[in-house]
Amino acid sequence: MVSTSEALFWKKKELVSFILSILVFFIHIFSFVRYRDTGSIISAVNERAAFFFKESITRFAVPMFFILSGISFFKGYDNSKYINKIN
């Protein structure tokens, strides 16, 4: 049986993974800057929004996935379980 703290950890990990997945999705879909009309207010807002999301906020999603996978791999680490985890 899984303890309460263990279940809470996996629920939090699932939520964080979902949010990070959305951020990785944003990295790949922000192409509306290509279709800008120079000089308009909407294009300036689009440009700033794209820079804010694509170049600042979303860039930490991939390293966070790496960290989460390391935490998941070594959660409850035991040398006898190591061989089973990598197979």
Image: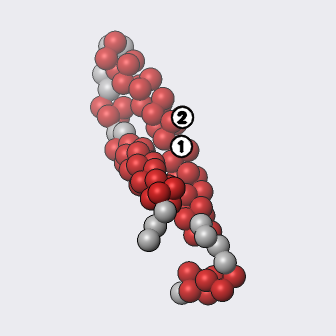
Residue toward you, 1 or 9? 1
Q: Residue at x 35, y 39 (%)?
A: 31
Q: Residue at x 55, y 44 (%)?
A: 60
Q: Quadrant of the N terminus?
A: bottom left
Residue density around tag 1, few if under 14, some if 14–19, many if 20 or more, within 10 Å: some
Residue toward you, 78 or 44? 78
Q: Is residue 15 above or below residue 85?
A: above
Viewer can see residue 65? no
Q: Position of residue 38 (x, y in %)?
A: 35, 19
Say which element carries label 2.
helix
Q: Quadrant of the C terminus?
A: bottom right
Left or right of 79 on screen, residue 31: left
Q: Identify the residue position indicated by label 1 in the image.
A: 59
In the drawing, what numbered circle is on residue 56? 2
Q: Is residue 57 above or below residue 18?
A: above
Q: Residue at x 39, y 18 (%)?
A: 44
Left or right of 72 on screen, residue 53: left
The amino acid type, in three-letter code, at marker 2 is Ser
Viewer can see residue 34? yes
Asked which quadrant contains residue 75, the reply is bottom right
Q: Position of residue 14 (x, y in %)?
A: 41, 54
Count of numbered badges drawn on the protein: 2
In the drawing, what numbered circle is on residue 36? none
The amino acid type, in three-letter code, at marker 1 is Arg
How far apart are labels 1 and 2 at the CA level?
6 Å
Q: Is residue 15 above or below residue 3?
A: above
Residue density around tag 2, few if under 14, some if 14–19, many if 20 or more, within 10 Å: few
Q: Are marks 1 and 2 in contact (CB under 8 Å)?
A: yes
Q: Position of residue 12 (x, y in %)?
A: 46, 50
